[in-house]
Amino acid sequence: MLKKFTFLLLFPVLTLNAQYKSVQYSYEKNWLGENQPLPAESQWMLNGSMPASIEMVELELYGSNDLDRKPLYRSDFRKASGIQEGSFSIPVNYILKGNNEYTLRVNYFRPAAPTEIEQLKIMIGEALASYLNMSVRSDRNSVSLSKHPRLMRQELDQIVEKGLGLYRNRTGIAFPGFSDLIYNKLHQINDLSLRKARFNILGSKDADEQALKITFFQQNLEDLKQMCMQEVNQYLGFQFLVLADSRVIPNYPTEKTRRTLPINFGYGGIYNEGGFNDLSYDSAPYAGVSFPLGNPALHRKFRSNSSVSAGVFLNNFDFGDSKEITGPLVGRPIYVAYGYKTAYFLRFNAGMTVLQEENQSDKSNIYIRPFVGLSIELNLWLGLSR
C-alpha cells in the first residue's frame, strides 16, 4: 500500500520529466552537457547547479548574438525559502527550430542589500525628476506638457523598468506602471493656469506676482515628483534580487531535423463552362509538390496542415468538342492550388489550372479554369534523419 501511495505522489513528476528533454548546463565550463545540440521541435528543461548565495537563475533565449534585442523567451527558477544549496531546473516551453542556432544567456541573482536598494531609489528618482523637468514647459500665464499625458506616463514607466534592469522582484511581480493618479496629475499640470497663483499660495497682496507664479509652478511639479516616488518606493518595498553573474553561450546549434519535400499524386476535376444541364468539364490524374505553410511542432493545426501545391496534370483534357486542351511550357495543364491535409496522407486541393488551346491560325489561347482534387501525399527525404 505504501509503495502504491509513493508512486501516486511521484507520478506527476515522472510524467513532467518524460515530456521534457533534459539539458545539463555547467557553470564552470559554460557549456551544455557534452556539447550536444539543443533539442529541436520539442519541449526541454535546463538543469544545473545552484550556489548557496544565489536565489534565482534566469534563462534568456535569443535568435542571434545581439543581446540588445528583446529575448525570444525568458523563464526562471526561484529557490525555495530555507534551501541553502542545490540545483535548478528551468522548463523551456519555447519550441526551437531544427538546423538553427540560438544564443543562451544564464543570469544568476543574489539578494540585494538594503544599501543597494536605497541607491536604486536615488537613481530612479533622479531619472524621473530630470525627465519631468525637461517635459514641463511654462510661459507667462500657463503651463503645458511637451507630450500627451498618456505618452508621458508610458515613458515614465519605461524609465523605471530600465532602472530595474539588473534587479528582479523576489515574488516575480513586475512593476505595474504608474497609476491613474499620476495620469490625472499630468493632466492637471497640462491645464494649469498661473493666473491662479495668488489664490493658491499663501502670500501678501504686495508679493511679486511673477515670483508667486514661479512658486506655484514649482509646487505642482514637486508634488508630481513626490507622487511618482511614492509609487516607486511602494514597489521597491518588496524583497529584491540583484544580478550577480551572467553567462552567455552564443550561436549554439539545435538538432539536425529531417528535411522533406511532400509529393502529391491525385485525381482532380476541372470545370470549363456551363450550368447544371450543360456542364462542360473533364478530369485527370495529377502529380506535384506541396510547400507546407507551417510545422506541426511550431504552429497550430490549421496552419501546419495547410500548403501551397503546384504540379501538372498527367493527361490533356477534352471538354466534349474533340479539341485537345493542353497547357503551356510542358505541354500538359499546370495547376497551382491551396492544399489541406484531411488525414495522415490525404490532401484536399482546390485551385486554378492554366490551360492552352491551339487555334486554326496557329495561335494559342491561354486561359485559367478552377479545379478540385484529392491526392495522396508522400514525403521525400532530402537529408539524413537526426
Image (tube, rainbow, N blue to C red):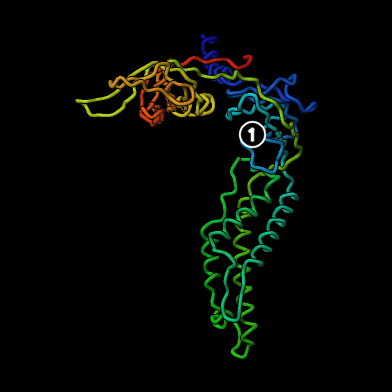
Q: Nearer the viewer, residue 62 or 78?
A: 62
x, y percent for residue 346 = 41, 17
**In the orientation shown, which residue stands out farthest toward the bottom?**
206
Q: Amino acid at mark 1?
A: Asp
Q: Quadrant of residue 344?
A: top left
Badge 1 element: strand
x, y percent for residue 175 = 59, 48
Q: Nearer the viewer, residue 40 or 365?
A: 365
State whether residue 10 is above or below residue 84.
above
Residue 204 in sight:
yes
Q: Residues within 10 Å of mark 1 (few under 14, many from 20)?
A: some
Query: Which residue is located at x 60 percent, y 77 percent?
Result: 216
Query: Which residue is located at x 58 percent, y 30 percent?
Result: 94
Q: Nearer the viewer, residue 5 or 14?
A: 14
Q: Nearer the viewer, residue 299 or 154?
A: 299
Q: Quadrant of the C terminus?
A: top right
**In the orientation shown, which residue stands out farthest toward the right?**
28
Left or right? Give the position of 1 relative to 115.
left
Left or right? Give the position of 137 relative to 276.
right
**In the orientation shown, which residue stands out farthest toward the front?**
361
Query: Which residue is located at x 58 percent, y 68 percent?
Result: 145
**In the orientation shown, which residue stands out farthest toward the left?**
277
- Judging by the rendered image, the residue that carries numbered circle 1 is 76
x, y percent for residue 248 = 74, 34
Query: Which residue is located at x 65 percent, y 83 percent?
Result: 211
